[in-house]
Amino acid sequence: MWVKLCCLLLYFLALFVLARVFEAVAWYESGFLATQLVDPVALSFRKLRTILECRGLGHSGLPEKKDVRELVEKSGDLMEGELYSALKEEEASESVSSTNFSGEMHFYELVEDTKDGIWLVQVIANDRSPLVGKVHWEKMVKKVSRFGIRAGTFNCSSDPRYCRRRGWLKSTLIMSVPQTSTSKGKVMLKEYSGHRVEVEHIFKWITAHAASRIKTIHSSEHLREEWNRSDQYRVKIYLFASLHQPPAFFSALSVKFTGRVEFIFVNVENWDNKSYMAEIGIHKTPSYILRTPEGMYRYGNNTGEFISLRAMDSFLRSLQPEVNDLFVLSLVLVNLMAWMDLFITQGATIKRFVVLISTLGTYNSLLIISWLPVLGFLQLPYLDSFYEYSLKLFRYSNTTTLASWVRADWMFYSSHPALFLSTYLGHGLLIDYFEKKRRRNGNTDEVNANNLEWLSSLWDWYTSYLFHPIASFQHFPFDSDWDEDPDLFLERLAFPDLWLHPLIPTDYIKNLPVWRFKCFGIRSDEEVLETFPDSESDSDSETREGFISEKEGSEDDELLRSQGCGAGSCSRAGPCCRQEPCGHGASCCGAAGGTEPDWSAWPPQMLHCTECVVCLENFSSGCLLMGLPCGHVFHQNCIVLWLAGGRHCCPVCRWPSYKKRQAYGQGQPAWGQGPS
């Protein structure tokens, strides 16, 4: 989990650096930055009209370019980034679909039960034509969708009784707006009573009703009273401008943030005395001022703070988030982190997707389970102060310059989803490359495994859970001691070869202790080889090799007779397990070597011995040893081949090699005394 979290943080850092690179390239090619102000005088009539449409200001009665330019200046400063976004949005010819309501319940669920949005619904009466034609309706839907206003069509032929009860006997337009300024308040339906059905006239009707919800101040005395008044709203945003009504995006945001942020429009068009504005720090208009308990913040001075619906929406969401906003953010982050498993996991393709699906299910389940107590705690009245301090922390952190950069990057990448996905894929491929390079030296079989091999190992793992779940869940070593498994006595009472042997995974072999055998006063193998005479004759070498081969063959036969493992098991592992005997090339301890082993290098709970019963050879100084949970010790190569061949038990005492055993007491005998 921590590896995936670090990879995700590196990805976000790469996105941040990439955004700065794009800004530098844009500045080099065009000579301006996104935060640079634009002079409306230098813009064409078409660009000025595009800016007004994005801000939601009507311009149908302004035929002159001078009037349009003055309206743009009165609504707020224009930046290069806002101009670029507006022109790109105008060029995009994406068709916005409207909702077709199937009946009363569908209409009630989407329109009347929605407390934080505006709906525009065209009602088509029985055997009547719609009020707005198809072409004009599509233009209307596209225009209002810029400001978060949803559109739909209700055909009375699908539910005539509901239309009669509502009084919709002729085709009309219905607009739903929250009636109160509290969150989750009642919704009020208003019917269009105009005679002209042009898009501009209908849009003026919509913006006029949406602006009526905003508190409007027309005098300095009223401003003084409102500025010094303290009420339930902790966050207020003021618009100081010389306009007849606020822009449509400002009115739409007031509906969206109902109960969280109070929107106030200060119309200074006919003010003679503006001394109080200078007293509170407002020296120019238009100005968007955010007032919080921590102080006053001027919107538009930092990166990405454009005069548009999308920019101000992301700004206010970061200052005054809802619980749903935090949940969606955590959901996106958790899933981005889980998808990193597709690149971190090495091996077959099917294995990658199986691990990915498992990780996605686990992470999302844990996220939902973690959010349930959080939602319960937030309902407690004792946590009101904690909630206020959390919002204060959000306001402090999200009014910094770094936060404005993050919001600007978020808007940039969300408007270019292909770039976001391609960078995520490239980052994942880099992680896959470095992870594959790191694991190639450690486990080549895992990296190069194909789909069939992995499915076969998955089936073996699954069947091991069915037949022998203890072997799959228990690993060695354990930190705590527990009593002997009662299943062991049942295994001892039966004949093991008459039972169906379960498929037991060999993962536990990696956890078995491994160390080197050392003796007091014995030099290392390298020193012995240096002192070994180089002029040894070939005849002596052949004689010694022949002697060793005869000795190993006789010892293999003796091992088969003494252990009683059957001809099908030891005979396969015997030749591969043979270690170099004590002689000229190795130094032995105990009775054969005349020196004492260094028992301090042995792990605790391991029985002291100097001989491997698998190959019947003494331990040489510097050889690798491996111990089993029962305490018996063998050559590492010998016991690994023994266990990998399917014999998951100790060659001496038959204790299962995947089960922990109680620690031996001090002075307990070494070999020969198995479990009683």
Image (cartoon, rainbow, N blue to C red):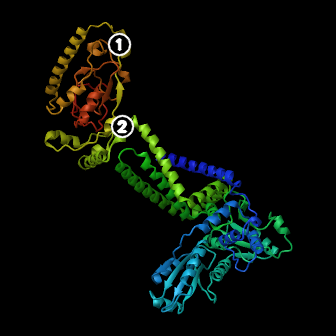
Which residue is under mark 1?
A: 529
Q: Picture coordinates of residue 271 (x, y %)?
A: 83, 74
Relative to 257, say whether 620 is above or below: above
Q: Picture coordinates of residue 73 (x, y %)?
A: 76, 69
Which one is in front, 131 or 606?
Answer: 131
Relative to 507, say whether 409 is above or below: below
Give the secondary structure at mark 2. helix
In the image, what residue occupies the spot 38% across and 52% down?
353
Task: Tell me: 178 left or right of 159.
Answer: right
Whether residue 521 appears in this view of the structure is: no
Task: Tell me: 660 left or right of 280.
Answer: left
Q: Which mark is residue 229?
A: none
Assign the C terminus to one quadrant of the image. Answer: top left
Task: Say how many tags the image has.
Answer: 2
Cα separation between marks 2 and 1? 32 Å
Which residue is under mark 2?
A: 444
Quadrant in the rendering for residue 312: bottom right
Which one is in front, 635 or 3?
Answer: 3
Q: Amino acid at mark 1?
A: Leu
Q: Picture coordinates of residue 476 (x, y %)?
A: 33, 37
Q: Amino acid at mark 2?
A: Thr
Disc 1 residue crowd, few under 14, some 14–19, many 20+, Cα 10 Å: few
Q: Picture coordinates of residue 530 (x, y %)?
A: 37, 11
Relative to 315, say whether 146 is above or below: below
Disc 2 residue crowd, few under 14, some 14–19, many 20+, Cα 10 Å: few
Relative to 21, say whether 532 is above or below: above
Q: Earlier in the sequence, mark 2 or mark 1?
A: 2
Task: Tell me: 437 left or right of 404.
Answer: left
